[in-house]
Image: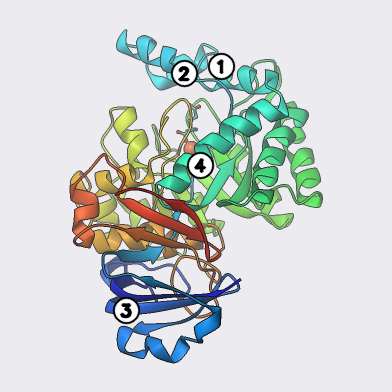
Amino acid sequence: MKRLIIHHIRQLVTVSGPNRLRRGAEMGDLKIIENGFLVVEAGKIIALGSNRDYLAFVNTEQCELINGEDFIVLPGFIDSHTHLVHYGSRENDLERQAKGESYLDILKSGGGIHQTVSQTQNASFSQLYEKAKASLKTMLAFGVTTVEAKSGYGLDFASEKKQLEVGKALNKELGPLVVNTFMGAHAFPKTCEHRDTYLSNLLKWMEVFRKEELAEFVDVFCEEGVFSLAETKLILERAQALGYGLKMHADEMVSLGGTSLAVSLNCHSVDHLLVTKDEDIDLLATSTTVATILPLTSFYLNKPMARARFMIDKGCGIAIATDYNPGTSPSENLQLAMQMAFLKGKLTPEEIITAVTINAAVSLGLEKRKGSFEVGKDADLVFLKIPNLAYLLYHFGINHVHSVYIGGQKLIERET
Ligand code: NIG
Ligand code: FE
């Protein structure tokens, strides 16, 4: 592979700094080089800095030179919370919601997640694969170079495994890195008569999936009528003992105490947080757990967004993700989630970029490889054709990506 040199970059947003969660005011302290350069070799960043120094890296035969004067270049965006692999769609939920049923009413009556579960169980590997691949391509076109993908629409051993195997197989094709999370604790299966039977199944499956290296994280939907706080604790403690990283869906509809449990278990992230109490925000602010907000989900459910502005002001470290799933966020558009965090959540452009780069990388344990431009890190790059960073968030609902590189290879180039 030739050495790639991007020179005269109008703004090189490096996000450089410590490879750890950026919290509170640190989230707004975004490192940007005006008129910068970046050098990539063998898929990694080998140099970056002010444009005046780039010529030293030009070794004539072996170089590809790109003029970056029209672009803002950033680390590839990381979508750290998705339910990428599933089958079917749920526009029918909307009709029920219009007639007054809530999300949890529909779930309780055997619809909602259960509808997607039966469609996912009945889908073949290749049907699931093709659908997920199409979504992954859409995400890539929006500038996303790493995607977390949860299981949890199988709820039996074979179907959960099938979902995780689709995630792994997608990694073999050139494209965004897919990080698998086992989320068998997404709902109790309709056919399950004893909660304890399903809980002990989950513990067994976790052990198998760990041995087979099918998942890096375990996540639980800690919610009223779904998994209780005690059940969540049981599952996550076992997962931790098996060596998984931990995640939790908490405080989406009802606050059960999930956030303080997530902090005490040192979860990589706790996600949703629509109804998180002040005292739990104080706890999060003193922790290394990433507070992941999902603005498209609150928009879709017509609920107030998580109090991200307040959380950052209190000292928390935030990530922003799509929660792409068929029931509460049928959209792969991470830029739209970022735009909502700006327009509705009053986060600054700098905080929002931190939230989808280094903080999202931390939430997936990838902070040493991804999420900022540092020598030795992966060359995942997004070129945006915009006049300034705020414009990305102001001109909403469209795609501002010009091109996307993963590991130094160009995968997307759009007419902009
Ligand atoms: O993250 N909250 C739980 N899981 C998904 C929704 C799943 C569904 O409704 O299919 C979420 O919002
Ligand atoms: Fe989710």
Q: Is residue 230 left or right of residue 89?
A: right
Tell me the residue at 31%/11% (across/down).
Answer: 98
Q: Is mark 2 within 8 Å of ligand 1?
A: yes
Tell which circle, 2 or 1, labels the residue nearer the N-terminal end. 2
Q: Residue 354 lies in what quarter of the image?
A: bottom left
Tell which circle, 4 or 1, labels the residue nearer the N-terminal end. 1
Q: Secondary structure at mark 4?
A: helix
Is label 2 or label 1 in front?
A: 2
Work out whether 149 lies above or below 20.
Answer: above
Q: Kindly identify which residue carries mark 1.
A: 115
Give the residue at the far top of this rendering: 99
Q: Kindly identify which residue carries mark 4.
A: 137
Q: Kindly identify which residue carries mark 3.
A: 36
Can I make out residue 283 in this image?
A: no
User: How far from the left and from the top, in percent, is residue 77?
Assistant: 42, 56
Of residues 96 and 179, the one drawn nearer to the viewer in this rendering = 179
Q: Which mark is residue 90?
A: 2
